[in-house]
Image (tube, helix red, strand yellow):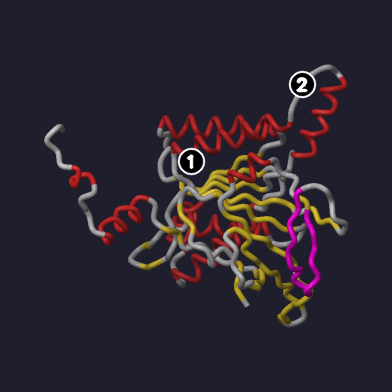
Amino acid sequence: MGEAKPGDWIQCDETGKAMLSRVLSGRPFIIPVPPLHRVPLRLGNVVEISGPSNSAKSQVLVQAVVHFILPKEWGGIHVGGMESKAVFFDLDCRFDVLRLSQILTHRITETCGSIGQIAFDKLFHDCMSRFLYVRCYSSSEFLSSLKELSYQIQRKDETVGTGLRLLLIDSVGSFHWIDRSNQLRGLCKGKNISSQSFQEAIVHELHELLLLQPLLVLATKASLFRTETPNEYQRSISNCTGDRNLLFREYMPVVWQSFVTHRIQLNPSDEFLSNGSEPIWSYTSEWLQPSVSMKDRFIVRDDGIFLT
């Protein structure tokens, strides 16, 4: 060590091409489905999908699930999926498994064509076996489920331990107001029950989970709009139906805000496309973090989400 020259510490030991190849092979970029396609994502990113009610937030999650659980190829046919496992934490208790089955069926039929029923059933079963569903009714159940997931990954359980690449939360603020109400009741009864401590524990468990197993995290969040300027933290966004600015209040704690790496805002639109006798309503998406000047407009059909 004493005979080493100072120049040896700064000597180049790999080319830029070799460095990029090493970094991208460890955590490669993921080509997400619309409307998440504008920003390159990779394992370890935490994406917050916010928007008011009926803005297709849950539909985006279902579309992402189908993309991840589909195989890369099957029977010599390029399918284009991620061939990975996905775990869905349903905090709103409104997940529609029939909608997932519908989109998955359309994708299999579209890519594989008219395969036999036996082959279709096998492929469908293989895809659904990569999908894990967890329903939680409180923050404590959600926290316990995250701890159990970490334990199963550490044990390399066959159900969860290998191949998990996507974690979805619908919706991350579902228990916020319940926890605040319980906190007030606890103070009245002389108990110290803090909603902030719940959120800190959940974010800490998610952070430890990402260190243990690199995952792409997609979390929906309902937006609370305000017409008056509050004293609290707020953001200004462009309304999809015009240039009028709307303010919405950030009600999630700072510990969650700092944990999120990407943010996208979804909004319903007054415009629709004609599909025979039934109109197809459209939606807009806008990246807030990182900021992207271009907005996308998309529709939700029986076979998934499509840009217009």
Q: Which residues are magenta?
A: 233-248
Give, as a three-letter code, the residue at label 1.
Leu
Relative to 117, say whether 8 is above or below: above
Query: Any magenta on residue 201?
Result: no
**Residue at 84% across / 28% down in the picture?**
184
**Residue at 55% across / 30% down in the picture?**
147
Residue 231 in view in this figure: yes
Q: Is residue 220 left or right of residue 245?
A: left
* Along the line of sight, the residue nearer the viewer: 130 or 191: 191
Residue 130 in view in this figure: no
Query: Any magenta on residue 240?
Result: yes
The label number, if any, that marks residue 210 in the structure image: 1
**Residue at 44% across / 44% down in the picture?**
214
Q: Secondary structure at mark 1?
A: helix
The label number, if any, that marks residue 192 in the structure image: 2
x then y, percent, for residue 212: 44, 36
Asked which quadrant contains residue 186, the reply is top right
Cα separation, mark 2 vs mark 1, equals: 30 Å
